[in-house]
Image (cartoon, coloured by chain):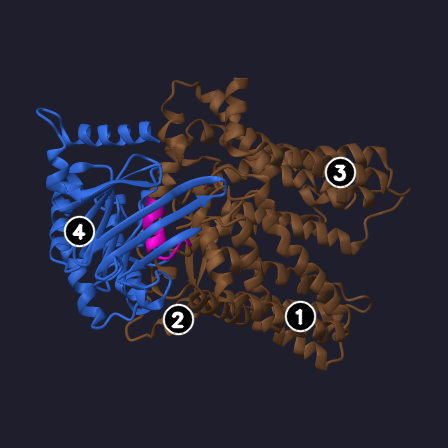
Chain colours: A blue, B brown
C-alpha cells in the first residue's frame, strides 16, 4: 500500500514559487482520511499557499498533490472539498441568502433549501439573510463565508484562520459545527488555542518545509517544565532554521 | 506640510503613473499649440462633441466621485496628530490628480480649433483650469448626495451646459462657443464657494466617509433565486437577470468604489432611448455619418470595459472557480457575458438594422459590429484585464489601493475596440472578417483547459481570491 492510498490529503515534495520567491520547498504532508490536522507555522511559512494548492486554485511547480486520491483541479475533487480562505469575502453583489443559493446551485447541493435554513440557523444569520454582503459586519461576513465553504457537506475541509473576527459564542457554535462533520480537516492557524480546539494533530511548517508532524499530545510533550506549547513550537522552528 | 503632501501623493499614485500624467499633459498642450491654425473656428460638430464629452465626464464625477481615501488612512493616518487644514490641502491635490486633471488634458484638443487668438487662448486655458477645479470640488463632495440628488444635480449641470444655445453665456460651454470671458466669470462664481465646501469636507474626510458608509439600504429591492438551477443555469441566471455596476473614478484605477445592482431591464431601457436618439441623428446627418461612427465606437468601448470590469471586480475565485473545473466555469462565464452584452446592446443593433434597411451609409457594418463583434470581444477584454489589472472589490467606498501605471493597461481593450469599430463601420467586408477573427479568438480563449487554469493561477498568485 502506497502512502497516497488511504490518505485524505497527500502532498509529496511539493515546490511552489511566486516569481523568484519560493513559497514551498519540497513540502510533504500525509493526513489519513477522517483525521484533523492543524497547519502551524510563522507568517510567510507557506500555510495559505498549501491550502490554495490543495483546492486547485494554484498549480505546483513540482511535486504530487492528491485530495482523497484525486487531482485537486478535477471536478471530482472540487465536489468533495470545502475551502475557506483567510479574510474571505463572499459575492458583494448578492445578499446573504443569494450567496448561499448561488453557491449551493453551482455545487449541485441536494435539498438546498433545507441545507440553507440549517446553516442560517446554526450560524445565527437568519436575521441577515436579505442583507447585502457589503452591509454585513466583518464577523457576520466570516460566518457567511464558513457557511459557503461547507454548504455541500465536503469530506475534505481546508480552513485558513477560520475563527477570525468571530465573537466567543459564535466561535463555540462554529467549533461544534466542525466537530459534527465527518471529514478530513486541515486548519491553517498560528493560534495554538484554535488549533487545539479544532484538531488532534499538527503539522509544523517553516520556510515552505514540513519540520514536524505528530499528534497534539506529542506536540504538548515537547514543552518542558513551565514552557508553553508556543515556546516549544518556536524552539522547533528555530532549530530548523539553524539546521538550514 | 510638504512632507504630508508627498506622503499622500506617494501612497495614492505610483511614481511612474505621475510621470506618465506629466508626459501626457505636456504632450497634449504641445500638440494643441503646434496644430493651431490661423483664424480657424471651432466647427459645430466638434463644439457639440467637446461640450457633450465634458458634460458627461462631469456627470460621471457627480455619480461616481469620492474622496481619495484608503483603508489604511482610516486605520492609521487619521489617528495621527496632523493639522486638518494641511490634510485638506494634501487630499485636495490628490483629488485633483485623480479627477480634475483629466479636464486639463482637453486643452490640447481645444486649442487647435480655437485658432491663434491670443485673448481667447489665455481665457480658454484659465477657463479649463477653473473647470478642472470645479470638477475636483464636486467629486470630493458628491458622495454625500443621495442618488436622486445626484440626478437633480446632473440635470442642472446639463441645463447649465445648454444655456449658451438659448442666448445666456454664463456657462462653461461658452469656452467653446466664442465667449470664454463669460465662462470664466461663471466658473469663478461657482469655484469659490464649492472649493470652500470641498476643503471643509476634506478637513473632516473621515467623518464624511463614515456617514456615507452607513447610508443606503442594507437590502436589495429584488431577490434572486437559484433553487432548482443546475450549476450552469445558475451562472446564466446570475449574469442575465442582473447587472452589477461598479463606480470607479480615477485615471488609472479606482478612486472610490461603489457597488450597486440593477435588473438587466434598466440598461436595456436606457440603451433603447439612446438608440432612438442615435437613429434620429443618423438619419439627419447628410455627409460623413459621425453619429454612426462615434455612437458605434463608444457603445463598443463602454460595453467591453463595463462588462469586463463588472466580472473581475465581483468574482470570487474561492467560490466560483472552486465549485467546478476552472475551464468549465471560465467558458460559461464568458458565454454569459457575451449574451449579457448582446442583450444590453440589442436596441442599438436594432437601430443599426433599421438604418441599414433605410440604406443609411455605414449602418450595416455598425450593425454587425454592435451585435456580434462587441459581445464576442467581452471575453478578450476580461482576459486582458485579468492578466494585467485584476481589481477585486472587497471594501467599498474608498480607494482600493495605490493607482499605478500598470492599471492604464486596462485601457488596452479600448484600442482594439476602436480599431475594429473603425474598420467594421467603413467596410462590411472588414466587419465580416473581424467577426471571424473574433470567433477564432473567442474559441481559443474559452476552450483551453490549460489557459483557464493558467489564468486562475495567475490571478490567485496576485492575491485575487
The answer to the question of whether label 4 and label 3 lie on touching residues, with beta carbons closer than 8 A, is: no
Circle 2 sits on which residue? B237
Q: Which residue was labeled with disc 4?
A: A36
Q: Give left or right: position of A175 versus A11.
A: left
- The x and y percentages for residue B282 are 72, 69
Circle number at residue B200: none
Give the chain of mark 3: B
Between label 4 and label 2, give the one nearer the viewer.
Answer: 4
> Do marks 3 and 1 both belong to one polypeptide chain?
yes
Residue A120 in the image, given as x and y percentages of width and height? 18, 59
Q: CA distance from mark 4 to mark 2?
A: 38 Å
Q: Residue at x 48, y 21 (%)?
A: B85
Residues rendered magenta in the picture? A48-60
Q: Which residue is mark 3?
A: B27
The residue lying toward the viewer, choosing from B184 and A89, is A89
**Labels 1 and 4 touching (C-beta < 8 A):** no
Image position of A86 (left or right of B363): left
Q: In the displayed structure, does residue A32 sit left or right of residue B347?
A: left
Above or below, A234 relative to A129: above
CB under 8 Å between callouts 2 and 1?
no
Could one spot residue A88 in this view of the protein? no
Q: Return the disc, 2 or 1, that comes first in the chain's sequence.
A: 2
Disc 1: which residue: B437
The chain carrying label 1 is: B
Measuring from the top left, give residue A64's x and y in whole percent.
36, 55
Name the chain letter of the residue that bears numbered label 4. Answer: A
Between the residue at mark 2 and the residue at mark 1, the CA separation in whole angstroms equals 29 Å
Asked if B445 appears above or below B182 in the picture, the reply is below
Amino acid at each position: 500500500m502506497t502512502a497516497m492510498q488511504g490518505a485524505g490529503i497527500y502532498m509529496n515534495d511539493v515546490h511552489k514559487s511566486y516569481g523568484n520567491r519560493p513559497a514551498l520547498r519540497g513540502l510533504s504532508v500525509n493526513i489519513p482520511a477522517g483525521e484533523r490536522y492543524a497547519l502551524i507555522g510563522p507568517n510567510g511559512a507557506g500555510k495559505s499557499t498549501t491550502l490554495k494548492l490543495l483546492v486547485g486554485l494554484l498549480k505546483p511547480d513540482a511535486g504530487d498533490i492528491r485530495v482523497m486520491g484525486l487531482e485537486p483541479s478535477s471536478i471530482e475533487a472540487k465536489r468533495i472539498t470545502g475551502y475557506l480562505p483567510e479574510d474571505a469575502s463572499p459575492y458583494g453583489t448578492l445578499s446573504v441568502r443569494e450567496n448561499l443559493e448561488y453557491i449551493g446551485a453551482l455545487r449541485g447541493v441536494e435539498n438546498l433549501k433545507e441545507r440553507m435554513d440549517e446553516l442560517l440557523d446554526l450560524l445565527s444569520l437568519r436575521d441577515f439573510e436579505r442583507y447585502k454582503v457589503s452591509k454585513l459586519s466583518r464577523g457576520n461576513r466570516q460566518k457567511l463565508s464558513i457557511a459557503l465553504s461547507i454548504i455541500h457537506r465536503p469530506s475534505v475541509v481546508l480552513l485558513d484562520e477560520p475563527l477570525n473576527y468571530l465573537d466567543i459564542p459564535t466561535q463555540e457554535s462554529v467549533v461544534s459545527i466542525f466537530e459534527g462533520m465527518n471529514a478530513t480537516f486541515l486548519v491553517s492557524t498560528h493560534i495554538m488555542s484554535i488549533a487545539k480546539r479544532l484538531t488532534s494533530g499538527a503539522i509544523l511548517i517553516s520556510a515552505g518545509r514540513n519540520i514536524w508532524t505528530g499528534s497534539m499530545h506529542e506536540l504538548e510533550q515537547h514543552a518542558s517544565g513551565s514552557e508553553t506549547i508556543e515556546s516549544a513550537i518556536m524552539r522547533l522552528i528555530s532549530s530548523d532554521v539553524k539546521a538550514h | 506640510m510638504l512632507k504630508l503632501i508627498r506622503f499622500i501623493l506617494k501612497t495614492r499614485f505610483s511614481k511612474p503613473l505621475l510621470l506618465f500624467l506629466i508626459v501626457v499633459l505636456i504632450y497634449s498642450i504641445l500638440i494643441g499649440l503646434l496644430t493651431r491654425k490661423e483664424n480657424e473656428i471651432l466647427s459645430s460638430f466638434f463644439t457639440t462633441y467637446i461640450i457633450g464629452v465634458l458634460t458627461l465626464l462631469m456627470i460621471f464625477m457627480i455619480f461616481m466621485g469620492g474622496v481619495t481615501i484608503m483603508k489604511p488612512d482610516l486605520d492609521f493616518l487619521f489617528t495621527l496628530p496632523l493639522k486638518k487644514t494641511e490634510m485638506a490641502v494634501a487630499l485636495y491635490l490628490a483629488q485633483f490628480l485623480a479627477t480634475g486633471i483629466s479636464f486639463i488634458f482637453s486643452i490640447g484638443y481645444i486649442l487647435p480649433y480655437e485658432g491663434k487668438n491670443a485673448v481667447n487662448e489665455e481665457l480658454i486655458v484659465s477657463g479649463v483650469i477653473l473647470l478642472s477645479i470645479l470638477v475636483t470640488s464636486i467629486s470630493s463632495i458628491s458622495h454625500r448626495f443621495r442618488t436622486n440628488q445626484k440626478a437633480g444635480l446632473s440635470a442642472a449641470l446639463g441645463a447649465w451646459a445648454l444655456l449658451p444655445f438659448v442666448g445666456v453665456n454664463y456657462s462653461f460651454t461658452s469656452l467653446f462657443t466664442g465667449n470664454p470671458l463669460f465662462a470664466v466669470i461663471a466658473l469663478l462664481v461657482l469655484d469659490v464657494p464649492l472649493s470652500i465646501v470641498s476643503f471643509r469636507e476634506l478637513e473632516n474626510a473621515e467623518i464624511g466617509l463614515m456617514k456615507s458608509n452607513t447610508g443606503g439600504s442594507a437590502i436589495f429591492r429584488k431577490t434572486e433565486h437559484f433553487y432548482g438551477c443546475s450549476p450552469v443555469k445558475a451562472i446564466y441566471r446570475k449574469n442575465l437577470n442582473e447587472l452589477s455596476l461598479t463606480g470607479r473614478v480615477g485615471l488609472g484605477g479606482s478612486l472610490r468604489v461603489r457597488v450597486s445592482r440593477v435588473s438587466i431591464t434598466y440598461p436595456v431601457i436606457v440603451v433603447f432611448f439612446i438608440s432612438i436618439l442615435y437613429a434620429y441623428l443618423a438619419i439627419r446627418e447628410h455627409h460623413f455619418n459621425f453619429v454612426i461612427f462615434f455612437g458605434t465606437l463608444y457603445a463598443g468601448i463602454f460595453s467591453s470595459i463595463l462588462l469586463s470590469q463588472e466580472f473581475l471586480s465581483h468574482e470570487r475565485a474561492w467560490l466560483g472557480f472552486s465549485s467546478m473545473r476552472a475551464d468549465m466555469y471560465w467558458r460559461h462565464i464568458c458565454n454569459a457575458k457575451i449574451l449579457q452584452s448582446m442583450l444590453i446592446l440589442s436596441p442599438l443593433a436594432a437601430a443599426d438594422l433599421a438604418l441599414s434597411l433605410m440604406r443609411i451609409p455605414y449602418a450595416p457594418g455598425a450593425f454587425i459590429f454592435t451585435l456580434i463583434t462587441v459581445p464576442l470581444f467581452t471575453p478578450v477584454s476580461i482576459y486582458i484585464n485579468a492578466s494585467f489589472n485584476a481589481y477585486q472589490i472587497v471594501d467599498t467606498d474608498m480607494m482600493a489601493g495605490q493607482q499605478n501605471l500598470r492599471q492604464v493597461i486596462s485601457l488596452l481593450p479600448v484600442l482594439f475596440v476602436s480599431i475594429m469599430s473603425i474598420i467594421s463601420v467603413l467596410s462590411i467586408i472588414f466587419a465580416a472578417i473581424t467577426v471571424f477573427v473574433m470567433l477564432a479568438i473567442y474559441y481559443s480563449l474559452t476552450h483551453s483547459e490549460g489557459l483557464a487554469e493558467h489564468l486562475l493561477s495567475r490571478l490567485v498568485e496576485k492575491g485575487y481570491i
